[in-house]
Amino acid sequence: MRPLTIAVPKGRVLKQLAPLFARAGIDTTSLLADDRTLLRETPDGAVRFLLLKPDDVPTYVEFGAADLGVAGRDVLLERQYDLYLPLDLGIGRCRMVVAAPEGAGPAPDVPRVATKYPRITTEHFAARGMSVEVIYVQGSVELAPLVGLADVIVDLVETGSTLAENHLVVREEITSISSVLIANRAAYKLRAAQVAPIVDALRAAVGG
Ligand code: PRP
């Protein structure tokens, strides 16, 4: 039987995810190993992990290269995927907000908004009947209003440090974000004998 394959995000969320996996009885030794391998297995060979950029996790799961994955709701809201979402993991909690420079005057009629999330941003302002010009950037979004690229930003806030240190303030909260377990639809049914016990163990670990 091939190992159950779980796509996990490298970076911040992995630090919260590993203890959750451990509570669910999944050996995390290989997951936490400090090396550059992108494909890792538990010692018993039952589970293998794919270490991915967070934005790529849903793609691997949707196409069946992984059976399960861990993805932020921000990524799932920004792009459309055909996935099953069995469980909110309660980690990676943050907020998606509109933020502007401290003390900024009223925004122009058509403000420029810098963001990694053009779709969410477009839908948010359209729902308020506001015209905006969305400017796509990949990161360091907080810099954009400081140097005249944009009037405001739409971005994630976790501790608030990045906003505060760049003299930005939250103007509006768009939605709250967390990490969810995602499953390939076919694997969820056809590999239920392997998938269901892991989902159940993670559900118990989240509750506990
Ligand atoms: C994220 C997010 C904010 C920051 C918020 O960026 O885009 O910039 O974290 O966290 P805080 O409220 O705890 O300061 P990330 O660190 O992932 O890097 P990026 O700017 O390259 O997207």
Image (cartoon, grey):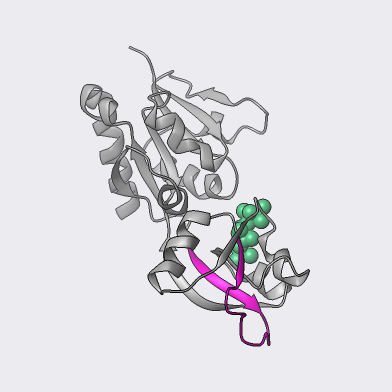
**Residue 13: image x %, image y %?**
53, 49
Measured along the vertical axis of the image, is residue 176 above or below residue 169?
A: above
Residue 59 seen from this side: yes
Q: Please, is residue 99 above or below residue 187 in the view? A: below
Is residue 96 one of those drawn in magenta? yes
- At x 45%, y 30%, the residue is 60
Residue with the most extreme top position: 1
Query: Can you name the residue that lies furthest to the right here?
Result: 147
Q: Looking at the image, in which quadrant does ligand 1 appear?
A: bottom right
Q: Is residue 203 left or right of residue 22?
A: left
- Location of residue 69 in the rendering, given as x and y in whole percent from the top left corner: 41, 36
Relative horizontal placement of residue 57, taking residue 4 as reference (left or right): right
When the figure is inspected, residue 166 is found, relative to residue 93, above or below; the finding is: below
- Residue 166 % position (x, y): 73, 72
The image quarter containing residue 194 is top left
Q: Is residue 117 above or below residue 131?
A: above
Q: Which quadrant of the view contains residue 35? A: top right
Residue 59: x %, y % from top left = 45, 33
- Any part of residue 208 in sight: no
Toward the viewer: 35 or 160? 160
Give the mark count: 0
Q: Which residues are magenta?
A: 94-114
Q: Identify the image quadrant of the N terminus.
A: top left
Residue at 52% in and 42% down: 55
Q: Quadrant of the C terminus?
A: bottom left
Q: Is residue 198 on the magenta stretch?
A: no
